[in-house]
Image (tube, helix red, strand yellow):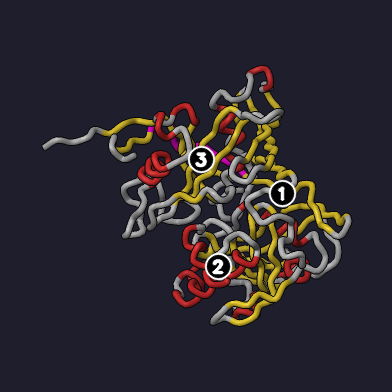
Amino acid sequence: MAHVPQIKIPATYMRGGTSKGVFFRLQDLPEAARKPGEARDRLLLRVIGSPDPYGKQIDGMGAATSSTSKTVIISKSTRPDHDVDYLFGQVSIDQPFVDWSGNCGNLSAAVGPFAISNGFIDASRIPENGTVTVKIWQANIGKTIISHVPITNGAVQETGDFELDGVTFPAAEVQLEFMDPAAEEGDDGGGAMFPTGNLVDDLEVPGVGTLKATMINAGIPTIFVNAEAIGYTGAELQDAINGDPKALAMFETIRAYGAKRMGLIQDIAEAQKRQHTPKVAFVAKPTTYTASSGKTVEAGAVDLLVRALSMGKLHHAMMGTAAVAIGTAAAVPGTLVNLAAGGGEREAVRFGHPSGTLRVGAQAEQADGQWTVKKAIMSRSARVLMEGWVRVPGDAF
C-alpha cells in the first residue's frame, strides 16, 4: 500500500509563563508554509494534533487546553530598531482553524530567550553575565514588546528562584514591557482603548440580561463584568465553570455580544471563527479563597479577584495579555476593574486568579478626553522543554 513518509521540521517546545507551545524559525518551515495561508494553517494544525473530535490532541504536540494549543513563528525583524518579528497562532482544539487575531502574553516571555538561543541576536550584544534587552515586534497586533533576558556564562539563564503561580517549578525571571498596549486606530481591535467611548457600558445580552461592562483594548481586547451580576463570587476554580455547560454557553454569549459592541465583528455568528479574541472576564472585591494548588490566598494579599475565559474555558491562571488588560483597566479610575480594586488612582495591581496571584503595573494618563497607557510591565519565566524536530505526514499541508 502506498504511503506518504513523514517530514522533519526543526522546532523547539517551550514554556512561557503559564503556557507552552511549539516554536519555529520562519526559515525552517516548508516553503509553502513560510507565508500566511491555508498551507501554513494546515501544517500547524497537524503539528498540534487538531482538529480532534475527541478533544485530546493525542496525535500532536498540543495538550488539549487553550494554554497548550499554541504555535509561534519567529523571524528576523523587518521593522526598524526591532530584533525579531513574533507571530502567534492559537490553534483550535476541535475545529480546523488557527486564530491569528491576538497575542499570547505568556509565550511572549519565551520569545526573547528563543531569539538569543537561535541566532537572531548578534553575539556582540550578549554579555558573559548580565541581561540582554530584546526588542520584539508582535506581528499579530502590531505592538512592541521589550524583553529583559538574564544571561549566565554567555547563555540564556533558564533556571532560578522566580516563582510564578500556575507554574509548578521556579525558574529565571524574564521582565516584559508591553509598549503602548492599548489599540490605536488601524489596529485589529476597534480603535481607541475604550472602543465604545465609555469606561462602563450597559451591555445587553439576550438570555442573560443587561450587564455593566468595561470593554477595553489593551494587551488583548477584553470584556470585564462584575462576578456578582452573573451569579459568581470571583473565587471560582476551573471545575466550577468548565463543568457547567450552561455557564460556558452564557460566557460565550456575553463574549459574542461584547465583541460586536466593541466593533471586532459585524455579526454575532462571526464570534465562532474568532475564538481567541476578545476575552471575557469577571471581577470581584477581595475575599479569601483556596487556589487550585491548595494554597490559601488571603483577601488582604490582593487588590481584587479576576477570572478569565480563554477559547471557551476558564483559564487555569491568567493569560498574559489579559493581565495587561487588567493592569491597564485598574489604572483608569471608574472602570469595573478599578472599582473592584477599591477605586482611585493606581500604578500597579495584584489580583487573585485560580492558581494564585499576579502583579502587573501600568501607568495611565488622560489627554483630550482619551485615556492612554505608555506601557504595562510584568514578570514571567520561560524554559526550553524539548528541541529538535517535529514530524508531520508529508501530505499534511
* Residue on which disc 2 sits: 256
Number of marks in picture: 3
Return the residue found at the far top: 124
Q: Which residues are magenta?
A: 381-389
Regarding residue 35, the answer to whether it shows in the image is yes
Taking the spot 72% from the left edge, 72% from the top edge, the residue there is 201
Residue 281 in the image: above or below residue 376: below
Classed neighbour count for the residue bearing mark 3: other residues with Cα under 10 Å, few (<14), some (14–19), many (≥20): many
Taking the spot 64% from the left edge, 67% from the top edge, the residue there is 261
**Dot placed on the residue nearer the N-terminal end, 2 or 3:** 3
| Circle 2: element type | helix
Return the residue found at the far left: 1
Mark 2 or 1, closer to the camera:
2
| Circle 1: element type | loop
Quadrant for the C terminus, please.
top left
* Residue on which disc 1 sits: 181
